[in-house]
Amino acid sequence: MGAIRKRGDAYHAQVRIKGWQSFTKTFPTKSLAKRWIAKIEAQLRENPNRSKIQDDVTLADACNRYMNEITANHKGHASETARLKFLARGVLGDIGLRYLSTAQINAYFQSRAKIVKEGTLRKEFILLRRLFNVAISSWNLSIPENPMAYLPVPKDSSNRERRITLDEWNKIITIATQMRNPLVKAVVRFAYETGMRRSEILRLRWDDVDGNICTVRNTKNGSNRVIPYRERLSRP
């Protein structure tokens, strides 16, 4: 059943049904709160009979399915897979998807914010929110509403302008020289000069190189990118 409580100038709406998480949201008017409660209750009533398999789907189960069905087709599948595995073995992993509440998820990301940088937090947040959307729209799991729909997305701190100092660079080169693989130093220098990602460098072929010009094909945004290099590259 739904309930509405006035808190200050806002109206706090809550829907609690046995066997489900509780759904809560705050509204500026009582009429909006009533409309939202009616919508949630209608969605729950119209849900098809839930199978035991659906009821037992945990976040860890959903992460594994997402990895196999969705992530495997993404260009950045390696990093996305790592994030999904981390979420699966985390504190929320053993909780059923339909029991995960907005409050639980918000508390989790508030805790993560004390440990990781904003960029990492944002990627994990967006990935988990997308997983819930897929579970609802494509997998037809018994989740009437994405519990992350009204949570603010963490800020994007991806804009980086700082270049490493000469002292930092010398330390990096010193360590790269000590690596067992003799190619590490060359790859590090090449990355420094071009600003290319590791995955882009590893995908390069000699056909993509013309003197001191490299063509990065099939980049993250789907287009090719031409990058100059101050030294002329030649086949070994």
Image (cartoon, grey):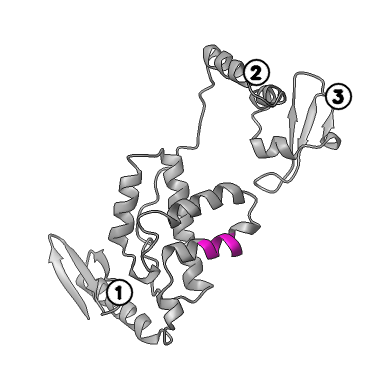
Q: Nearer the viewer, mark 3 or mark 1?
A: 3
Q: Label 3 vs label 1: CA separation?
A: 65 Å
**Is 3 left or right of 120, judged from the image as shown?**
left
Q: Earlier in the sequence, mark 3 or mark 1?
A: 1
- Give the amino acid type for the residue marked by disc 2 in the picture: Thr
Secondary element type, mark 3: loop
CB under 8 Å between discs 1 and 2 = no
Return the residue at label 2: 177
Q: Quadrant of the N terminus?
A: bottom left
For the residue pair 121 and 56, the one nearer the viewer reads as 56
Residue 57 is situated, as x and y percent measured from the top left of the image, at 43, 71
Dot 1 alpha-carbon crowd within 10 angstroms: few under 14, some 14 to 19, many 20 or more = many
- Quarter of the image for residue 18 reads bottom left
Can you say whether 90 is above or below 175 in the image?
A: below
Q: Label 3 vs label 2: CA separation?
A: 22 Å
- Give the amino acid type for the residue marked by disc 1 in the picture: Trp
Q: Nearer the viewer, mark 3 or mark 2?
A: 2
Task: Please name the residue shown 63% across and 19% down the image.
Answer: 178
Return the residue at label 3: 234
Secondary element type, mark 1: helix
Please check the rendered image and state whether residue 221 is part of the magenta-colored stretch, yes or no: no
Residue 199 is situated, as x and y percent measured from the top left of the image, at 67, 39
Boundaries of the magenta span: 64-70
Residue 53 is situated, as x and y percent measured from the top left of the image, at 45, 78
For the residue pair 122 and 180, the one nearer the viewer reads as 180
- Quarter of the image for residue 51 reads bottom left
Q: Quadrant of the C terminus?
A: top right
Please check the rendered image and state whether residue 66 is part of the magenta-colored stretch, yes or no: yes
Return the residue at label 1: 36
Secondary element type, mark 2: helix
